[in-house]
Image: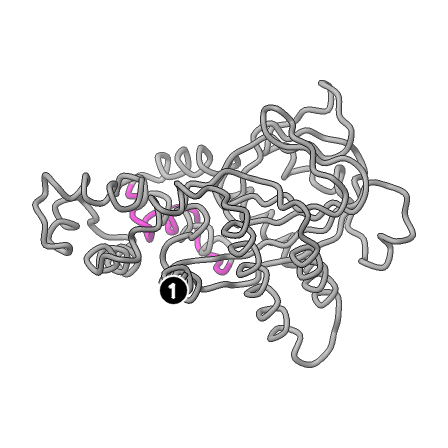
C-alpha cells in the first residue's frame, strides 16, 4: 500500500474544464480520442463505448484516459448517426448543447456532465495513459459521481476561492479513481507492469531530460548518455520499464507540448512544430492529425472556443 501512496503523491493534477450537456442529436464517434483525461457522468439516457458498445448506466461514469482511442456513442444511435472524431469536434454544438447543472433536473432529455483534467507523474508522464489501461466504466461508486458533480457545480460559480476549490476537487477525483481501480482490482497486471518507472531514478532522469529538451536532439544515443547505459540497450531498457519505446514516448510528449502551445500562444503552426522538435512542418502536421484526429489549426480553434465558453 505504501507503494501506491507514493504513486498517488507523485501525480500532479490540473483541472482543465467541466461542462454539462444535453444530447441534442445522437451521435456515435467512431474514433473518439482526446489529449486529456475525461470523465463522463451519465445523468439520463444512453451512453455506450467500445467496439462492443458496452452500456454506461445512469449514475455511472465513463473514464477515458488521455490518448486512448475508442468508439463513444451519445444517445440512441443508428448507422446513419456515425461520425469521425474530427467531424464531431468541428460540429460539437450540433450534438451536445451546453446547459447549467440546475437545468439537468428539469429536463427529460439525455444529459451528461464531463470533467477534463491532467494527471502527470513528476510533471512529465501522463499517468493514466502510461499505465496502458483502456477506457472503462466506474460502476457502483457514488463517491466518484458526487465529486465530479461538485467540480462542475463549482465551475459555474463566481465566488472567491473558486480556482482553489476546483483544484482540490479535481485532485480528489483522481485519488478516488485510483482508489476505485485498486479496490476493484482493475488492470492489476497493467498497474504492476507499467508503473515500475517509479522505482528507477535513471528513468526519471530521462523523463526530466526529455521534458527540458523537447525541441532538441532526443535520439537514443543522447538518452543512453543521460541514463548511463549503452545506446544498443537504451530502447529495450526504456520499454522494459514503461511498456513503450522511447521514440514513441518522445513523440507523444512533443505533441502534448504542441497542444499546450496552441492553447496558450499565438505562435504559428510552423514555429510550434520547430519548437517541439519538428523541422519539417508538413510532417509535424501529418503526425499531429494522426494522433489527435484533427489538424493543429482546428485544434487551436476548438481550444479557443472552449476557453471562451469556460
Coordinates of residue 266 in the picture (x, y in percent): 49, 57
| Rendered location of residue 220, percent (x, y) | 16, 44
Question: Any magenta on residue 272?
Answer: yes
- Please report the residue visible at 75 percent of the width from the left and 42 percent of the height from the top: 96
Q: Which residues are magenta?
A: 264-279
Which quadrant is the N terminus positioned in? bottom left
Relative side of 269 to 53, left or right: left
Q: Is residue 110 magenta?
A: no
Question: Taking the image as drawn, is residue 309 in sight?
Answer: no
Instruction: Give residue 76's quadrant in the image.
Output: top right
User: Is 243 displayed left or right of 127 in the figure?
Assistant: left
Nearest the eye: 289 or 72 = 72
Residue 143 point in image, percent of width and height: 67, 59
- Which residue ends up furthest to the bottom in the rendered image? 160
**Residue sitting at 90 percent across and 48 percent down?**
107
Q: Which residue is mark 1?
A: 2
Q: What crowding class fits label 1: few (fewer than 14 Cα within 10 Å), some (14-19), or many (20 or more)?
A: few
Which image quadrant for residue 189?
A: top left
Amino acid at each position: 500500500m505504501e507503494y501506491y501512496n507514493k504513486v498517488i503523491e507523485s501525480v500532479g493534477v490540473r483541472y482543465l474544464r467541466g461542462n454539462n450537456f444535453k444530447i441534442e442529436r445522437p451521435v456515435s464517434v467512431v474514433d473518439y480520442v482526446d489529449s486529456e483525461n475525461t470523465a463522463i457522468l451519465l445523468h439520463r439516457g444512453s451512453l455506450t463505448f467500445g467496439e462492443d458498445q458496452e452500456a454506461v448506466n445512469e449514475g455511472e461514469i465513463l473514464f477515458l484516459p488521455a490518448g486512448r482511442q475508442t468508439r463513444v456513442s451519445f444517445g440512441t444511435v443508428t448507422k446513419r448517426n456515425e461520425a469521425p472524431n474530427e467531424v464531431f469536434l468541428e460540429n460539437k454544438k450540433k450534438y451536445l448543447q451546453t446547459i447549467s447543472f440546475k437545468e439537468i433536473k428539469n429536463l427529460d432529455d439525455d444529459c451528461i456532465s464531463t470533467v477534463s483534467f491532467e494527471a502527470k507523474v513528476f510533471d512529465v508522464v501522463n499517468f493514466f495513459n502510461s499505465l496502458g489501461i483502456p477506457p472503462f466504466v466506474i460502476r457502483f461508486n457514488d463517491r466518484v459521481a458526487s465529486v465530479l458533480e461538485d467540480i462542475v457545480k463549482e465551475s459555474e460559480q463566481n465566488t472567491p476561492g473558486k480556482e482553489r476549490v476546483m483544484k482540490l476537487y479535481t485532485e480528489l477525483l483522481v485519488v478516488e479513481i485510483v482508489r476505485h481501480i485498486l479496490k476493484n482490482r482493475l488492470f492489476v497486471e497493467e498497474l504492476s507492469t507499467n508503473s515500475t518507472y517509479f522505482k528507477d531514478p535513471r528513468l526519471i532522469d530521462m523523463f526530466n531530460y526529455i521534458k527540458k529538451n523537447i525541441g532538441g536532439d532526443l535520439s537514443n544515443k543522447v538518452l543512453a548518455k543521460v541514463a548511463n547505459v549503452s545506446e544498443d540497450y537504451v530502447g529495450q531498457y526504456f520499454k522494459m520499464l514503461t511498456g513503450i519505446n522511447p521514440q514513441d514516448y518522445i513523440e507523444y510528449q512533443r505533441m502534448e507540448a504542441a497542444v499546450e502551445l496552441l492553447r496558450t500562444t499565438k505562435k504559428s503552426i510552423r514555429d510550434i512544430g520547430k519548437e517541439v522538435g519538428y523541422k519539417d512542418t508538413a510532417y509535424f502536421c501529418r503526425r499531429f492529425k494522426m494522433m489527435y484526429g484533427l489538424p493543429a489549426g482546428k485544434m487551436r480553434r476548438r481550444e479557443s472556443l472552449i476557453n471562451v465558453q469556460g
